[in-house]
Image (spheres, coloured by chain):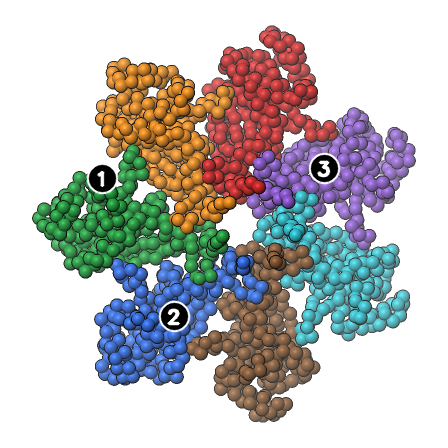
Chain colours: A red, B purple, C cyan, D brown, E orange, F blue, G green
Amino acid sequence: MFRNNYDNDSVTFSPQGRIFQVEYAQEAVKQGSVVVGIVSKTHAVLAALKRNAEELSSYQKKIIEIDTHYGIALAGLASDARVLSNFMKQQSLASRLTYDRPMQLADITARIGDRAQINTQQYGKRPYGVGLLIAGVDATGPHLFEFQPSGVTQEMVACGIGARSQMARTYLERNLEQFEGSNREELIRHALRALKESLSQDKELTVDNTSLGVVGTGDAKERFRLFEGTEIQSWLETTFENQGSTQEGEGMDVDK
Amino acid sequence: MFRNNYDNDSVTFSPQGRIFQVEYAQEAVKQGSVVVGIVSKTHAVLAALKRNAEELSSYQKKIIEIDTHYGIALAGLASDARVLSNFMKQQSLASRLTYDRPMQLADITARIGDRAQINTQQYGKRPYGVGLLIAGVDATGPHLFEFQPSGVTQEMVACGIGARSQMARTYLERNLEQFEGSNREELIRHALRALKESLSQDKELTVDNTSLGVVGTGDAKERFRLFEGTEIQSWLETTFENQGSTQEGEGMDVDK
Amino acid sequence: MFRNNYDNDSVTFSPQGRIFQVEYAQEAVKQGSVVVGIVSKTHAVLAALKRNAEELSSYQKKIIEIDTHYGIALAGLASDARVLSNFMKQQSLASRLTYDRPMQLADITARIGDRAQINTQQYGKRPYGVGLLIAGVDATGPHLFEFQPSGVTQEMVACGIGARSQMARTYLERNLEQFEGSNREELIRHALRALKESLSQDKELTVDNTSLGVVGTGDAKERFRLFEGTEIQSWLETTFENQGSTQEGEGMDVDK
Amino acid sequence: MFRNNYDNDSVTFSPQGRIFQVEYAQEAVKQGSVVVGIVSKTHAVLAALKRNAEELSSYQKKIIEIDTHYGIALAGLASDARVLSNFMKQQSLASRLTYDRPMQLADITARIGDRAQINTQQYGKRPYGVGLLIAGVDATGPHLFEFQPSGVTQEMVACGIGARSQMARTYLERNLEQFEGSNREELIRHALRALKESLSQDKELTVDNTSLGVVGTGDAKERFRLFEGTEIQSWLETTFENQGSTQEGEGMDVDK
Amino acid sequence: MFRNNYDNDSVTFSPQGRIFQVEYAQEAVKQGSVVVGIVSKTHAVLAALKRNAEELSSYQKKIIEIDTHYGIALAGLASDARVLSNFMKQQSLASRLTYDRPMQLADITARIGDRAQINTQQYGKRPYGVGLLIAGVDATGPHLFEFQPSGVTQEMVACGIGARSQMARTYLERNLEQFEGSNREELIRHALRALKESLSQDKELTVDNTSLGVVGTGDAKERFRLFEGTEIQSWLETTFENQGSTQEGEGMDVDK
Amino acid sequence: MFRNNYDNDSVTFSPQGRIFQVEYAQEAVKQGSVVVGIVSKTHAVLAALKRNAEELSSYQKKIIEIDTHYGIALAGLASDARVLSNFMKQQSLASRLTYDRPMQLADITARIGDRAQINTQQYGKRPYGVGLLIAGVDATGPHLFEFQPSGVTQEMVACGIGARSQMARTYLERNLEQFEGSNREELIRHALRALKESLSQDKELTVDNTSLGVVGTGDAKERFRLFEGTEIQSWLETTFENQGSTQEGEGMDVDK
Amino acid sequence: MFRNNYDNDSVTFSPQGRIFQVEYAQEAVKQGSVVVGIVSKTHAVLAALKRNAEELSSYQKKIIEIDTHYGIALAGLASDARVLSNFMKQQSLASRLTYDRPMQLADITARIGDRAQINTQQYGKRPYGVGLLIAGVDATGPHLFEFQPSGVTQEMVACGIGARSQMARTYLERNLEQFEGSNREELIRHALRALKESLSQDKELTVDNTSLGVVGTGDAKERFRLFEGTEIQSWLETTFENQGSTQEGEGMDVDK
């Protein structure tokens, strides 16, 4: 019977140079419900499928506002995500208090990456079991970053992580060229469509199980805002009943 | 013979991204006697089945007042629960002394979640072997939260944890729509009925083995109070003999 | 051959949520000679069977005065008990010096419980291998608490721990109703009778192998005192020769 | 083949509640040569069999003066005994310097017991592999204490530890009643006779292999003194040639 | 079945004096995409093949500017490389702030070597799983250094590390004599050709998957600069369509 | 096949109360070349057989002067001996600087014993793998002590440790009575003869492989001095060619 | 199949008193290319065979100047050697700054020996995997020391360590008598000839693969200097073409 001698902790390389515990932590991300992110020239959008483990619980919190200019979507261990989001909130607040400016997105992403790397190189710790999409707008425009348990972070045009996220990614790859030029409404609809691809056959996106995070730049500067429940009703309708529609005029008010 | 190589400590992921020691700690919760919580627009209620390991002992303490505005019900390792409740009392007292305001329930819940998460990511510790229901009223109204050994916390409409709690949850799910609008007496009766569902066939709820925690808001602002013994006599009678009765006038005095 | 993979240390849960090392520590309590405690409305009494490992040694110290208002009886590892009793003495002394008041019994019991809990959640320690009965009188009246290696503590009406203590408990359960109203002499006789139940057939309680701890409240306020040797002669006689006698006038002087 | 899974370290309980490493440390005591102690109303006496591992070495130091009012006899690991005796000397000196009074014997015994207990409850340490008899005189009269690797300490009337010490103990038990009233010379002879019982058939007590420690109270206040070599000649003669003789007038001078 | 007993951690030598975990870390370098470095009398050049794990991600960052006078190319674990490059940036900045001079390349290379060595001699750490090429110009002219997970660093004339890098090295060895005298354009073309050798048959170097780092000395002093995308178009064309051409006049502007 | 479960570290007792790692360290002493020490009423002498692992190396340093009044001879791990001798030098220097007096030999011996004992009672250390003979003269006259890896130290009349040292010890035991009254020259010759006994048949003591350490008291107060090479020529000659000669007048000058 | 239970770490003795991990570290020395050292009355010389792992790399640095009066040659793990040489440089600089004098060679050698010893007596570290030859001139004349992973250091007349060094040592032993009286040129030629002995049949010493370190005393006081490349051309020629020639007049200039 096969016995892997190299997967006991995150400070042991396999003979092939792999660190299995880091790879297993990546599996924890795949247990989380799917989240999707897309960035255009003017906006960054997060969309998430919320699970409720049982009817009695409120739905999981999948998208979290960190600062007025960005938020995160998570897939994996919720308590690990809370630790990381608390850290991001503290860092972002410190940046505003100390330097009087919002944290750069590439910067905060690198910091959680560094923090995560330590857990992959020290005995007695374990890698974080959560993946994050960081979406926001800073001095250099809208950005989308992916954070992985390995501490690897990379900027993305669009991304999907979590259970069955391969289907979301396939949608995103097929429509990759359209994102940069998409306006706010188009971007949201792309995110919702990508999210829907990852649902199993018999499931639908509803006002209960879907949440959106939107942030924008340009003239209509829009701070990061989480949309849930009835707020997303009309997007769900326009996206899945009039697919391809680009009539933004029918869109909804935006919190500026 | 099956040998699980990944369940020795809480800093090791299985190849499927699971942390077995955290899951085993969850089993300790299932060894505890059942506790139930429900929240309405105006009240939050906890109900607990008290065991006495032997006749000579007093009954277990299953519901603990933490501050005047909230309390907890526990299932699992009692000494772990004491450590956590002491921590909550200190934090709540510090909030009152430092900021002159009661602790927000979402806040204190997150703090014990963070504390528990550390024990799941550091070698040489073990996860807490206890689950908690946190019920109370704060500036944002009545709330019910569930705390799990993994450090995951979530707001609930109603919840049951501990031995045979699945039956209590089934009752709660069937009656989910009624809770929000229930008045104090109705809510207590729902909690007692849910609790009774989890008893084995030959057991009854009695003034000895049942305890209740009630806290309210609105006009009749009611601080958290624990009811035990003869205090709950009439509730047990009205609940199980005149099921469905909503004659609140027959209720009992409330400590305001 | 069965091999338990989960009983190596106290920071590992079994798949059923048990911590075996804590349970094994409980077995150490069962190796100790039996001790019994009972509480009435006015008095708390401890009775202990003292072993002498060999003829040459003095008898074991089974009952220890901690402060003028309470004492403990122990079963299990004597050196662990000494560590805990030293801690209790320091805490009690500090309470008197700092606040000028005797330590509440529920309070000191919780403190040793917390201290013991740490040893069940940290690698490299082991649980205390001793059980304690804490008996005394404080501002809220007479109390009896049981302390277990798990850190669990509970208030008891009557309790027996140590070797063959099940027999003592059976006696206590049969007479449970009588304790609350018993006077000092009756309570002592109940304690002695319960203790005797746990002796093997061919053994007798004697002035050499028996010790008593008594503390009282009310008009005849009686500080905690240990009775041994000839001091307990008449109790042994009245208890086992005139069973049922309640002639207190024949009792012995009490140190007030 | 039997494999004990619970005897690897001193922080693991066996399923029966035993700590095997502590029991194994007790075996180290049994490897040491025998030492005996007896206490009367007026004196405390230690007697020891000194081994010389090889002819070239001086004989082992088995009895050590700690302070003017007490000394110890040891059986087991000599280097562990040195650590403990250094600790006792420091504590005793500190007592004299700080409080201007000799250390109480019960007190110093409890301190080494506490120190030893720590080594039985912390991973990475091992229990001391030595047993001690502490004999001396303090404000409360003459005392004899036994210290064991477990940290257990107990006051004794008489005691023998080390190799074949069971035979010495049998002698002591047979003569137990005589000790309390024995005078200095009688007590010494009892100690020598008990010691001799533990020798193998073909061995004799000689001025080379025997050492005595004597301390007394009362009118003839005698500080702790070690007797070796020709100093013990006449005791050996009177003890083993005129057994039963009680002619003290023939005794030897005493260092007061 | 073969079982290696000496490859569990980096503080264990095999009987042949090897440290397997360090060798396994070297395997992680071979999992990274290939990077190449060459140094001439006047310039140092880095060339890297960028992978994009999926279409949605931006390409990996394979070349990083550390200071104005040097940069690195990496192969292996990206998060380990980030930790090391952060350290290099801090050290280089400190050198400029404290001593007002750029860090010597041999010096900074030795420092990361020392840092890496520690991880190979301390239990509970793991070696860095990344190899680096450090290329730059300092007071002593252009330099190229290789850093390995073992902490070994060596100055190189030319070097290739990462997947299939043996092919790049074969090219470099065949053309070794030409490098010292090559001008900037020739050196870049050598680097690109070496890089191409390591591509699998069906792959091509493109403006998307190729990046270059160039730094120079002499009259045309050129600070370290990263070239990507359309900036490298003409180099790709002149290298692979007019192989052997040395018409520098057709080269591209250089950021001075 | 026999598998010893108790010999992995020095903090584990075997069921027989043995600490195998300490015993194994004693084996390291037996790997060292033999050293011999003898003490008389007026002198202490050390004699050592020096090995040269290969022809190219200088001979091992087997005798080391620690202070003007004493030196040590070592058998076992040379680097462990250096650590201990450095410690002894520091302690001895401190004694002279602080108290203006030479260190007592019993005192310095106890200190290294205590230091060694710690390594036998703490996980993660190992016992010193070296034995020492400490020879010198202090206020109480000449002394010879043996230090063992266990931390045990004992005063000796004569002693031999290291490879084949049993033969040296047999010689010493046969001549034990003569040592006390021997003069300087006789003592040296005894030491050389004992040393020779431990050589294999075909080996001789030579000016190259022999070293002597001598220290004396009395009228001809002689500080500790190491004799090697031609200095010991005449002793070798008088010892092995005129065995039994006691013509001291022919001895050699002494450094006073 | 043989399984060594005692070679897991450097704090475990085998039953024969060996520390296998230290011996395995010695094997790492044997993996390094050969280095040779010889000392005469006036000079100390190091000679080293440099490997280049691949054609592209510069040759390994085998001889390192530590201070103006001495240098080292290394065989084994290069990164371990760098740590030790950095330490030696710091110590030597400190000696000059603090005491205004060059470090004694015996002193600096003992310090790295002590540092290495620690790694053989502490769990979680590993021995250094490198051997060093330390050659230089101090107030007491020219010296050559060997440092081993065990922490053992010894002064040598001549020495060879590293791969196939046995052959160099055989040459050195055969010519041992000539070294003390050799002049500078003769000593260098001896070192080169010894080095050549360790080459495999088909290899030659060249200006590329050979390096020399020379330091001298006396009238022509010569600071430590490393000779490489064309600088050693004429020595190679005179050594291997005119073997036995002693025409120093043909030698090369010396940096004084």
Label 3 resides on the chain identified as B
Could you tell me which residue is drawn at 75 percent across and 51 percent down? Answer: C154
In the depicted structure, whether residue G213 falls above or below residue F239: above
- Tell me if label 2 and label 3 are in contact, CB under 8 Å: no
Label 2 resides on the chain identified as F
> For this rendering, which residue is in front, C138 or E6?
E6
Residue matched to label 1: G208
Mark 1 secondary-structure assignment: loop
> On residue B133, which mark appears?
3
Could you tell me which residue is drawn at 39 percent across and 68 percent down? Answer: F162
In the depicted structure, whether residue E35 falls above or below residue C109: above
Q: Quadrant of the C terminus of chain C?
A: bottom right
Label 1 resides on the chain identified as G
Could you tell me which residue is drawn at 59 percent across and 38 percent down? Answer: B14
Q: What's the distance in space between the residues labelled 3 and 1, CA to CA? A: 76 Å
Q: Is residue F111 left or right of residue F47?
A: right
Q: Are marks 2 and 3 on the same chain?
A: no
Mark 2 secondary-structure assignment: loop
Could you tell me which residue is drawn at 58 percent across and 12 percent down? Answer: A185
Mark 3 secondary-structure assignment: strand
Can residue D221 be seen?
Answer: no
Q: Quadrant of residue B112?
A: top right
Q: Amino acid at mark 3?
A: Leu
Instruction: Give how far across and how far down residue C168 sits, in percent.
Output: 80, 61
Residue matched to label 2: F164
Q: Quadrant of residue G175?
A: bottom left
Q: Amino acid at mark 2?
A: Arg
Q: What's the distance in space between the residues labelled 2 and 3, CA to CA? A: 74 Å
> For this rendering, which residue is in front, B154 or C10?
C10
